[in-house]
Image: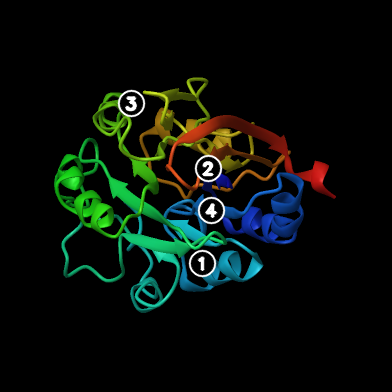
Amino acid sequence: MKVLFLGEVVGIPIVKNLKKKIRIIKSYYQADFIFCNADGASDGYGILAETAAELLNAGFDCITGGDLIYNKRNIKDFISYNALLRPYNLSPSSPGRGYKIFTLSSGKKMAVISLLGRNNFNKIFAGDPYHIEETLLSYLAKDNINSIIIDFHGGTTSEIQSLQWLLAGKVSAVLGTHARVLTADSRILNSHTAVITGLGLCGSPYSIAGFAPNVEISKIKSGRFSYSKIDKENTVIQGVLLDIDEATGKTESIVSINKVLSEFD
């Protein structure tokens, strides 16, 4: 089973370009499933219900959020009924759900889980993500679900990598998001679990986390607030392609993706 998981989509202009080519991209990589993180899909700071609907209707099987998941007012109703995941380790009373189960062509099942770290996030308060082993993973094991992919939206590399090692051999993949930087450390731990610290972004490689550099530099130098501007120059898609054994849940290969979107014209 091949799973394509793309890095954080940043900005509505990127969504407009990306949604036209999702099915082409999925076919190009011969992916059975395609997911993405979309925590900044509307303006870099959250996701509107309309934007989430556009991505899902375009062909994404599931999209994940992060610390900005509730930034947009109209997302709370949408998230309760659609394949947009909020972090699992938020309060159980939070709108939405933190994982989704898919039935594979073989009849087996696969779970996608969204988790949020606790370092460097001061506007949202998540529970301890490391307890997932005793809670959700234990529940999934009882249902014989061994293909499990985790999007860990973490504020530090050490936090992301600690969870990766904790769950090595127990899940199919632990993929780090939030920094919007594609890291060069994709590998498989314990001959089972695919990991990468940073899944990257869908946006401009000539940007600061998807934003126009001149605006971000001006804010830092002046100390004054100004609205960030989405950078659309030479949009790329970044992420990973996973090849997972459906029978065991082991990831047999992980390949980093970093490709200019216009190549799919």
- The residue where tag 1 is placed is 52
Q: Position of residue 191 (x, y in %)?
A: 42, 25
Q: Is residue 41 left or right of residue 77?
A: right
Q: Position of residue 235 (x, y in %)?
A: 69, 42
Q: Find the distance from the CA under tag 2 to the CA under tag 3.
A: 16 Å
Disc 2 crowd rating (10 Å Cα; few below 14, some 14-19, many 20+) is many
- The residue where tag 4 is placed is 35
Identify the mark nearer the N-term, 2 or 3. 2
Q: Are marks 4 and 1 in contact (CB under 8 Å)?
A: no
Q: Name the residue at the right extreme.
A: 265
Q: Position of residue 177 (x, y in %)?
A: 42, 39
Judge whether residue 65 can be spotted in this image: no
- The residue where tag 2 is placed is 7
Residue type highlighted by circle 3: Thr
* Secondary structure type for disc 4: strand
- The residue where tag 3 is placed is 157
Q: Are marks 2 and 4 in contact (CB under 8 Å)?
A: no
Q: Is residue 159 left or right of residue 4?
A: left
Q: Are marks 2 and 1 in contact (CB under 8 Å)?
A: no
